[in-house]
Image: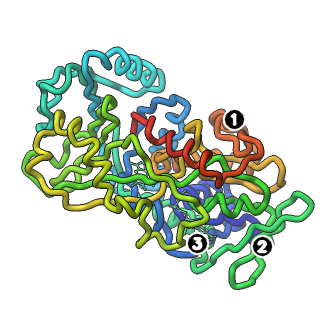
Amino acid sequence: MNRDILIVGGGIFGASIAYALARRGLGERVLLLERQQLAGAATSRAAALVTLVRDKPHFIPLVQETRRAIEAMRADFSEDVGLRQVGALYATSTAGAAELDRLAASCGEFGIVSEKLTPDEAIRHSPWLNPAAFDAAVLFPQEAYVEPYLLSTAYSRSAAHLGVRIRLAADVRQICCANDRISGVELRSGEILPADIVINAAGAWAGLLSAELGVPLPMAPVRSQYWITEPDAIFPRQGPIVLLPEIRAYARPEIGALLFGIRESRTAVADPRLLPADLSGFVFDPSDPDGWENLADGAEQLRRYFPAIDRLGIAHYITGPSNYTPDGNLVVGAVDRIAGLFVAAGCNGAGIAVSGGVGRLIAEQITGQACFVDAAPHRVERHGLFDPFAPEFLNLCAAARSRKTSG
Ligand SMILES: Cc1cc2nc3c(=O)[nH]c(=O)nc-3n(C[C@H](O)[C@H](O)[C@H](O)COP(=O)(O)OP(=O)(O)OC[C@H]3O[C@@H](n4cnc5c(N)ncnc54)[C@H](O)[C@@H]3O)c2cc1C
């Protein structure tokens, strides 16, 4: 059988697209190409919040689709992706309470349940929070996190069960086209793989492959990071995810410890041309390799909500690239100028959460089905022609991360 649909990149987007195509009966036509390990780049570094509550409501159906895919893979292939439905607790001052109510009401229209709590009720769920630091709280009990490596490899294993072939050590040098139509890809080994359809799901490197085709992607790899404390008895293992929108912080339980992130006011962004294929030794900002300056910047605000931070040590620091876009939308869909070319990138730090929706959206576009959501906000060519490597553009993308307040 001729594998005429090639997916470049075996991270969570490539894997979920392979699965969605295979569910539609196209598995035998799909070849997934990965140059390193499946789920070894941004995907395995994620905090893996699969949160439905979003300040952009059009992301919600994409996350709901991920939850459906997790359920379908459990039922069909006994895949356990480590889903922990622990709920999410939002806490805010009186000044932010109306905004939180508005968020709960808009999410309610999508069937997302919420419950108002007093600060004293809230700290029964999260005893590490200081009740004097906030006046209003809302619990969203359906919220969850997963094991990102397990979810990504569940998609690729399920896709393989349904006929998709996966090829490792396949380093794509370029996506090839002739007369504005896809003709295949060329590997670094010189091998040519002919194809009618190519899906560029190469994560932080997707922009490099696209730029060579004259299709700049409106995104840049921005440093995402979080810290994990030492274990301590104040962190219940089944405690909820906590979101503190006023200080742009989030936290979740992590095996008796607390995983937390603060969306820093100064973000580090990389020129994609300088990103190595192997991220293990990569440092975004040599002057602040472990993000300590960012942590120090936010420490005072964090201490107000989380006083125990002063006595607890930090056991781990995790960092990696997320592709942020100036408008906060994804970069997903068909490229109008080149027939047969599709892109799935621009995750804005939500690629694990929206993975199922992205897979479905691309599969529907390839099979010509009506899309289950409006694809327009995520259009690949929405910014027209521009220089995706110009410092001003990279800074616009970094600023998008600094503004983010939901999961
Ligand atoms: C610290 C951190 C925390 C995060 N927290 C969350 C969170 O809580 N919730 C959430 O939803 N998201 C989170 N994210 C974002 C999430 O990790 C990403 O959105 C997601 O992993 C993107 O998946 P991807 O498949 O696009 O990219 P990747 O996982 O990076 O995969 C891209 C793949 O393409 C391969 N590739 C690249 N170029 C080529 C080539 N030329 N040939 C062949 N293969 C190639 C790479 O080797 C790689 O395996 C976080 C990210 C980070 C870094």
Q: Mark 3 points at which residue?
A: 34
Residue 196 is situated, as x and y percent measured from the top left of the image, at 81, 63
The reply, left or right, for residue 379 in relation to residue 316 is right
Residue 133 is situated, as x and y percent measured from the top left of the image, at 17, 27
Q: Name the residue under label 2.
A: 2
- One can see residue 203 in this view: no
- Label 2 vs 1, first from the N-terminus: 2
Q: Name the residue under label 1.
A: 376
- Ligand 1 neighbours mark 2 (CB distance < 8 Å): no
Residue farthest to the bottom? 189
For discs 2 and 3, the disc positioned in front in the rendered view:
3
Examine the rendered structure and indicate whether residue 307 appears above or below residue 279. above
Q: Which of 359 and 339 is in front in this view?
A: 339
Residue 179 is situated, as x and y percent measured from the top left of the image, at 92, 60
- Ligand 1 neighbours mark 3 (CB distance < 8 Å): yes
Residue farthest to the right? 179
The reply, left or right, for residue 129 in relation to residue 199 is left
Q: How far apart are marks 2 and 3 (CA)?
A: 19 Å
Residue at screen point 26% across, 16% down: 94
For discs 2 and 1, the disc positioned in front in the rendered view:
1
10 Å crowding of disc 2: few (<14), some (14-19), many (20+):
few
10 Å crowding of disc 3: few (<14), some (14-19), many (20+):
many
The reply, left or right, for residue 202 in relation to residue 142 is right
Q: Which of 231 and 384 is in front in this view?
A: 384
Residue farthest to the front? 287
Q: Please state which amino acid type lies under the numbered disc 2.
A: Asn
Q: Please state which amino acid type lies under the numbered disc 1.
A: Ala
- Label 2 vs 3, first from the N-terminus: 2
- One can see residue 18 in this view: yes
Quadrant for the C terminus, please: top left
